[in-house]
């Protein structure tokens, strides 16, 4: 599709609504509010994807590289019938004649943690005739970028929770954290691009992921190489259809067949198709010697019920349910007690829970395991669409707002500050200078053009060209 059609309909009239003589529009992208308790910084991520995929690839393929008459006629056909007018498309013709997007984007490095209300990047037109283009791109930009920033931020919070508890209960095994949060979200996301963008955000903090296209996306947009670095990874794992096909009356036979099929490596087996507690207390003890003889780990996957209670146990009349999966696995397979005094399961056995995990539940699982004397690293958490799809652009209040324009050669500092709002929608004013103080990103607005150029923003895109091309490894390192 012509990417100029990827916009809100009301953008079509804004060019003629600006004051006569407007020649420049300067805008910024900012997270304005956090709706997740305890999160006051947002991970900046996804702009390079947006630039490569849309501002370069799609604009070239579906606009600049097509015959002018063809793309202009298509644009006019849709807009005329949409608005019910004879729409003037001269500005679209001029853009096609120019052959590139006359836009400059200045941004922080991706992977930066940005405080709420601090801008992440700015956009401005580089040629006066195309002042209208800056905010015309707002819709597409917002549509694409809010989700990778949001998912990257939430994944980072999971990583911080898991790392904190690992340091408290299993400090010699903190390297395991990269696998302890596993992306299970793809099937529940709103589309393939949503899955990829969110999945890439997850993978800034974790290596574990079942969202396979993320590997290809990181190679395409962020200079990764799956043959030379760990981008994402996973293990052999069953689903309920496999277990059902093996019959309920021979579930132990299915386990035994799987163990023989995969004599080495990690094998994850969904274990609540019928009776989780029977699997853990009956079948696994019968298979104990075979499990211990394997060159690898068997991972038990409960997939229903309250994840905190299932993993950690709860106050229940049934002593089996009261213990929970981790303690029951310890009863059968044992393990070691580390120098911090916490129990670590035998490396031949483990558990993963991947249904309805949230930041709160992840914290509760780690806390309950710690209270019972078990290391938090005894369990892997599958993080799914319950975490990554239950968000909107408003989760962190993302918005792109114009704060400076030039009209007839005169600079005007502009802003919004609705009297009916609680302050969330109040924008910056004028040009922006970004700086660091006490290891915290801060900004000043209403600065001169000279000062604006001296700040931390780097020009990453200008006049159709990507000027800074960052690799996944550097972004991960920056966030870490």
Image (spheres, rainbow, N blue to C red):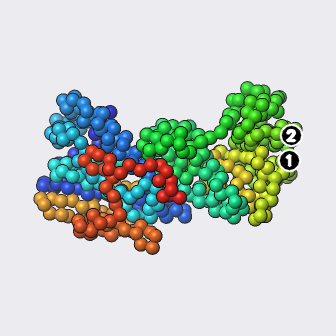
Question: In the picture, residue 98 is in which quadrant?
Answer: top left
Q: Which residue is mark 2?
A: 289
Quarter of the image that includes the N terminus: top left
Which residue does the image show at 35% across and 63% down from the upper left?
456
Q: Does residue 282 appear to the left or right of 157 in the view shown?
A: right
Residue 220 got which mark? Answer: none
Q: Is residue 211 above or below residue 338?
A: above
Residue 439 percent across, percent down from the top left: 46, 70
Q: Residues within 10 Å of mark 2 (few under 14, many from 20)?
A: few
Question: Number of labelled discs?
Answer: 2
- Distance in Å between CA atoms under marks 1 and 2: 11 Å
Q: Earlier in the sequence, mark 1 or mark 2?
A: 2
Q: Residues within 10 Å of mark 1 (few under 14, many from 20)?
A: some
Of the two numbered discs 1 and 2 in the rendering, the one whose residue sits closer to the viewer: 2
Q: Does residue 63 appear to the left or right of 97 in the view shown?
A: right
- Asked whether residue 152 is in view, the answer is no
**Among all residues in the image, which is located at the extreme front?**
228
Which residue does the image show at 69% across and 57% down from the upper left?
173
Q: Which SS class for mark 2?
A: helix
Front-most of residues 125 and 208: 208
Which residue does the image show at 82% across and 39% down from the upper left?
293
Residue 187 percent across, percent down from the top left: 56, 37
Pointers 1 and 2 in contact (CB under 8 A)? no
Q: Does residue 341 appear to the left or right of 192 in the view shown?
A: right
Which residue does the image show at 26% across and 57% down from the upper left?
26
Residue 421 percent across, percent down from the top left: 38, 64
Q: Which residue is mark 1?
A: 332
Residue 222 percent across, percent down from the top left: 44, 45
Question: In the picture, residue 267 is in which quadrant?
Answer: top right
């Amino acid at each position: 599709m012509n990417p100029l059609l990827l916009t809100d309909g009301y953008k079509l009239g804004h060019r003629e609504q600006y004051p006569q003589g407007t020649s420049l529009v300067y805008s910024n992208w900012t997270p304005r509010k956090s709706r997740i308790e305890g999160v006051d910084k947002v991970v900046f991520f996804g702009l390079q994807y947006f630039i490569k995929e849309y501002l370069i690839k799609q604009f070239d393929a579906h606009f600049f590289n097509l015959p002018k008459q063809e793309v202009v006629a298509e644009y006019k056909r849709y807009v005329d019938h949409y608005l019910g007018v004879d729409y003037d498309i001269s500005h679209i013709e001029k853009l096609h004649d120019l052959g590139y997007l006359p836009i400059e984007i200045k941004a922080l490095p991706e992977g930066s943690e940005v405080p709420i209300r601090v801008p992440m990047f700015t956009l401005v037109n580089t040629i006066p005739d195309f002042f209208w283009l800056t905010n015309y791109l707002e819709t597409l930009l917002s549509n694409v970028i809010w989700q990778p920033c949001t998912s990257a931020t939430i994944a980072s919070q999971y990583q911080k929770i898991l790392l904190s508890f690992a340091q408290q209960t299993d400090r010699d095994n903190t390297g395991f954290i990269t696998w302890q949060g596993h992306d299970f979200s793809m099937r529940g996301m709103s589309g393939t691009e949503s899955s990829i963008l969110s999945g890439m955000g997850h993978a800034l903090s974790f290596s574990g992921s079942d969202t396979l296209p993320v590997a290809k996306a990181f190679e395409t947009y962020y200079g990764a190489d799956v043959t030379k670095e760990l981008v994402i990874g996973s293990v052999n794992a069953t689903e309920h259809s496999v277990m059902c096909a093996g019959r309920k009356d021979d579930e132990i036979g299915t386990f035994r067949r799987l163990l023989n099929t995969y004599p080495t490596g990690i094998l994850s087996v969904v274990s609540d198709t019928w009776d989780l507690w029977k699997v853990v207390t009956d079948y696994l003890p019968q298979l104990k010697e075979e499990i211990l003889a394997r060159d690898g780990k068997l991972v038990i996957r409960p997939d229903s019920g309250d994840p905190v209670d299932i993993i950690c146990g709860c106050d229940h009349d049934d002593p089996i349910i009261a213990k929970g999966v981790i303690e029951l696995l310890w009863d059968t397979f044992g393990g070691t007690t580390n120098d911090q005094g916490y129990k670590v399961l035998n490396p031949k056995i483990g558990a993963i829970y991947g249904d309805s995990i949230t930041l709160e539940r992840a914290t509760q699982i780690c806390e309950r395991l710690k209270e019972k004397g078990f290391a938090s690293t005894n369990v892997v958490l599958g993080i799914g669409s319950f975490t990554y799809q239950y968000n909107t652009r408003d989760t962190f209040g993302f918005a792109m707002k114009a704060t400076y324009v030039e009209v007839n050669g005169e600079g005007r500092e502009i802003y919004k500050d609705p009297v009916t709002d609680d302050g969330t929608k109040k924008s910056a004013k004028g040009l922006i200078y970004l700086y660091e103080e006490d290891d915290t990103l801060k900004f000043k607005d209403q600065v001169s053009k000279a000062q604006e150029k001296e700040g931390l923003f780097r020009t990453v895109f200008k006049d159709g060209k990507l000027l800074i091309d960052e690799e996944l490894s550097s972004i991960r390192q920056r966030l870490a």
